[in-house]
Image (cartoon, rainbow, N blue to C red):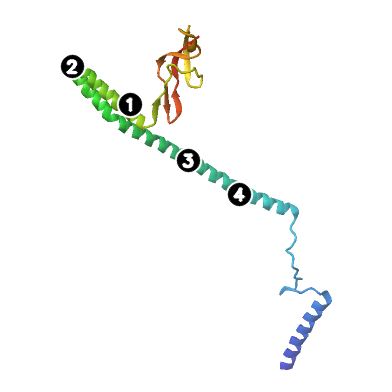
Amino acid sequence: MNEDKASLETDNLVNEENSEISNNVPLDNAGQEITGEAPKLDPLDSAKAEIAELKDKYLRLYADFENFRRRTAKEKLEMISGASADTVKLILPIVDDFERAKVSFESSTEIDALKEGVDLIYTKLYKALESKGLKAMESKGADFDAEIHESIAQFPAPSEDLKGKVIDEIEKGYYLNDKVIRYAKVIVGA
C-alpha cells in the first residue's frame, strides 16, 4: 500500500511537471493558468467604475467646499458683530455724558458752562471715532475731485485761482482707514 501511495505522489509530480513543460505556463491550485496580467475587464465596466470614482471625488469636493463656504460666512458675521460691539462699547460712555448734559440743561442757567460741556463731549466723541480709523477730509480750497467730492452747486469764482476749486464745504467728507465712507458735499467755483 505504501508503494501505491508513493507511486501516486510520483505520478502527480510528473504530471504537474509535464503540464508546466507542455504549456510553459504555471498553473495555480485550481489548475488555471497563472499569468502576470490581471484579467481584462470589459471597457464598459472599467468606464463605469471610473465614472463612479470620479463622481465620488466630485461629491466629496463639493461637500468640502460647501462646508468651507458656510464656515467662512459664519466667521465673517461673527467678526462684524464683534467689531460693532467694540464700537458701541466705545461710544456708550459718550452717550452717558450726553444724558448728564441734558439733565444739566434743565437745571443750569450758565450758557458758557453748557457750551464748554458740549464741546468736551464732542471732543471725546471725535477722539473715540479717530481711534477706530475715522479721519475728516480737508476739502475747502482744494481742487475738485469727483472721487472724493460731490458737487451740489457751482458759483462764479471770486478770483481766477479759485476756478475748479472747492469754495465752500456744506457737509464734511470722511475716510475710514483711508477709504471714503462719506463724500464731501461742496460748492465748486466756476
**Residue 152 in the image: x percent, y percent?**
46, 12
Q: How far apart are marks 3 and 2 (CA)?
A: 51 Å
Question: Residue 2, position in %: x, y?
Answer: 71, 93
Point out the image quarter for the N terminus. Answer: bottom right
Q: From the viewer's perspective, is the residue at label 3 or at label 1 nearer?
A: 1
Q: What residue type is labelled 2?
A: Glu
Callouts 3 and 2 close, C-beta under 8 Å: no
Q: Which residue corresponds to mark 1?
A: 126
Disc nearer the start of the sequence (3/2): 3
The Cα–Cα distance between marks 3 and 4, rounded to whole angstroms, is: 22 Å
Q: Is mark 3 on a helix, strand or loop?
A: helix
Q: Badge 1: few (under 14), some or many (20 or more) residues near its Cα, within 10 Å?
A: few
Q: Earlier in the sequence, mark 4 or mark 2?
A: 4
User: Residue at (45%, 20%) from the top-left corner?
Assistant: 183
Task: Report the disc number at residue 72.
Answer: 3
5 above or below 89?
A: below
Please tell me which of labels 4 and 1 falls first in the chain.
4
- The earlier-in-sequence mark between 1 and 2 is 2
Tell me which amino acid carries mark 4: Lys
Say if mark 1 contacts mark 2, CB within 8 Å: no
- Mark 2 lies on a secondary structure that is helix
Residue for badge 2: 106
Give whichever of 154, 89 is nearer the camera: 154
The residue pinned by badge 4 equals 57
Name the residue located 37 percent from the left edge and 37 percent from the top edge. Answer: 82
